[in-house]
Amino acid sequence: MQLDQDQNWEKRMADIETKISSTPLIVEEPGLNTTQPQRKWKTGGIPLAFVLVLGLLGLLAWGLKKAQAGPVDSGLAPDFSLTGFDGRTVTLSELRGQVVIINFWASWCPPCREEAAYLEQTWRKYKDRGVVFIGVDYVDTDKEALAYIQEFDITYINGPDIGTRISQAYNIKGVPETFYVDKKGQLRGVHIGPLKAPELDQKIEELLAEPDPGN
Amino acid sequence: MISEIGLIALSIAFLFSVYGTIGSAYGGLRNRPAWVESSRNASLLVFPLLSLSVLVVVYNLYVLDLSQAYVADVASRAMSTFLRVTALWGGQQGSILFWAWIMSGFVAIVLLRKWERDRELIPYVIAVSMLTTTFFVGVVVFITNPFARLWHVPGAADLTTSVFQPINAMPYIPEDGQGLNPLLRHFGMIGHPPTTYIGFTGFVIPFAFAMAALITGKSQEDEWIRTSRRWTLVAWIFLTIGLILGGRWAYDVLGWGGFWGWDPVENAMFMPWLTGTAFLHSVMMTEKRGMLKRWNMVLIILTYALTVFGTFITRTGVISSVHAFSKSALGPAFFIFIGLTFIGSLSLLFSRWDALKTEHQLESFFSREAAFVLQNMLFLAITFAVFWGTVFPLLSELFTGTKITVGPPYFQKVTGPLFFALVLLMGIAPLFAWRKQAAHSLGRAMLLPLAASLGITAIWGYSHRMHPAPIFGLWLVSFVLLTILTEFWKGVRARMQGRGENLFLALSRLIGRNHRRYGGYVIHLGVVMIALGVIGDAYFKQETQGTLTAGQSLTVAGYSLRFEGLNSYPGTDGREVIEADTTLFQNGQAVRQLKPRRDFFIVQEQPVTVPAVYATAGTDVYILLLGWQDDGRSATFKIYINSLINWVWAGGVIMMLGTLVAAWPPRDGQKETTYQLRPQVFGPQPSTGD
């Protein structure tokens, strides 16, 4: 009995305390709080909230449709955007209709030096014939990479692979590696190790000879 | 035979989930307690049934039953038993089963506790949580069944994966499995998925209570919010651990010297964490002041929606990312689920909008309430910035035809200042009183930490003249740290003087008396430590690289790395290890032999760079072996000097401890009502105890 009473007393005290402390300084009638602005917010807000949610769902549906439409065949080259050291940006999926050569390299990589001049020379030879070269700089420091680009007078776009995302998407095993992408955006082979003349010319000629898609 | 048992258990679990969902909703709407009781029992059984399925998959992985497509996909002979078992969550099929299993476990725990208090809510709590569980179990049964086998249909070029035998097909058993993705063979990756899944699925419980409160019209009462707060805390801490383990994994395995890359999958985890954190704070406003009821409802719905959204974008490849999960039939199913969740919860919320009125208005902009509102706005702003950056590639492609991916610089620039403000608020806000704060007492409380932190920063800034941003950051960290420690000190001193307790007794009693408050402060301490680590990562990182022949050295920031030679040997789990012997010198003195490695996984033809790390309290020397030439006579290294990075991991541990303190159940007689508003407790002057 005594215990029960004690507990009741404690509870009562707590209740009283709650009541006292949660009473607003200015006593208001309950219900007076429904102010006009909240109403207005509500009537305008609900359709807006639904429009936003439906918009997001639409966006996701569209993205999903695209993600599912791609061929399950791993032949489609993984898309990426690369921002070059010179500030230019290139996105692989925008280059449909052109032959793309993706070269992974690094300034610390001696074999890369062996192929650098040949790459640049080939690029100059084909750049007006619908061929794009992209240099992806793998785990490097900007200063040394820029010195390397200057040393070999490289004029095609080169940029750092931030967070090694592109390297992972292409699952590279080391540098240098060169991937060939055809006019349809399909991967058409990879060359591991430094390129030597006339491998690259032959591959480019082969891919250029194929018909243009979609036109 | 064993697999059939797993498949049957899985199928029954699906039927029970469907029954639990429909039966409880019917029982609730028509007020038939027998239906609710029966649905509850069915729902309770889903957990043991799924446990059985999980056990069967684990057993199949353990014995390497290669007739199972899933086993052949993620396990191989070369993998150790431990890795094979953890491959349960290494692939799509297994991880969704695992997901469904954890979710059913959460539901079971909720249903096993006393539910007298929530009698009216429970039917809908069952219905909502079981609807979600039904979806995941359904996906496991119909779309990504882990018990599917490999079949060879005569004439077909590829193998068929199917649960049942296709016509004319012959069973196919490969010689060996593919094996787990080498990048996932790391302790961070072994612990990261389960904790993340527990965090993600855990949010279904507060969401279910919120929905039940809306359906029953009990949403203006506080009962649901108390229950939701606890469950949110449970989900939140697991999500926190998952985030930190994921960061640790990226740091150790991905080999770019950092721990957070603002990748869509990371963002997908981070967004519900942000809104969940906002909810854990704003819920106090509802508990103590009856304010922000609508807002809390919005936050809970948002948090849950973001977990679903995160799962959707990572599982369906809508936004491409490093974590490429394979394309599958999951997409459309997930889309329907996500649509139902979004529209259903939004409609319910608006139907009860008027009932969720606030009990008090904001009295002063100089109050604890206002600080909470500001804090919530900051969290939401960060969430929105992260969300925008995450969906931007999709938006840009829709409107311009070009997929523009925003990189880490965007996230850093946009969220950096917001995080700065948030950490600052974290230091000041606990000093504010509820309702109204007098300016002079606030100034008095802040004076000492402010002066001390400015002093420290001035000395430090004078000796290291550099960019002002890190100096500002260090001031912030020291200021917030000092305010938190001052709070502890004031409480402890009051007890020591008032009761004659010694330091440790006073500290433990202080925390014990108000574990929610002081647990929160401990979590804040952890956040400050992580902030310090992030500042170090952003401003004090140094790096260098070079090709060395044996005996040559590479020097950076007082450290020098000497290359001794290269070895190669066959390692465990089917890898060939190429290892460099190096010696690290600090100011001319040899401090450690280090062996950075590159492991080639032969079956997967995949290299994994394993950094060698020399860790001290202040700095990590992080060394990568990038390549080698001339048959190993020379090798190329990259060295990162990662200052302060260990504070991130240490801060994570402190946050876990703080959560344990904060979530500790109140002692007998210390009822929740004692948390009701008492300005003198929460004001700048600490109470002397009870």
Image (spheres, coloured by chain):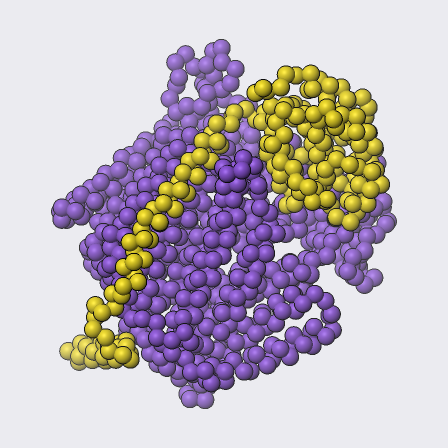
Does residue A9 appear left or right of residue B581 in this picture? left
Above or below, A26 against B37 in this view is below
In the figure, residue B151 lies in which quadrant? top left
Left or right: where B36 falls relative to B110: left
Q: Is residue B464 visible?
A: yes
Q: Position of residue B485 (x, y in %)?
A: 52, 76
Q: Is residue B454 above or below residue B573?
A: below
Q: Farthest residue in the top direction?
A: B155
**Residue visible at 59% across and 55% down in the picture:** B412
What residue appears at the point 77 percent right and 29 percent down from the top-left corner?
A123
Indicate the position of residue B217 as horizontal and vertical percent values: 21, 56
Residue B233: image location, x then y, percent: 39, 59
Q: Along the horizontal axis of the image, is B33 left or right of B548?
A: left
Q: Which chain is yellow?
A: A
Q: Is residue B651 visible?
A: no
Q: Nearer the viewer, residue B509 or A115?
A: A115
Quarter holding the N terminus of chain A is: bottom left
Q: Residue at x 66, y 51 (%)?
A: B257
Q: Say which chain is purple.
A: B
In-image side of A152 versus B535 (left or right): right
- Is residue A181 positioned above or below B473 on the image? above
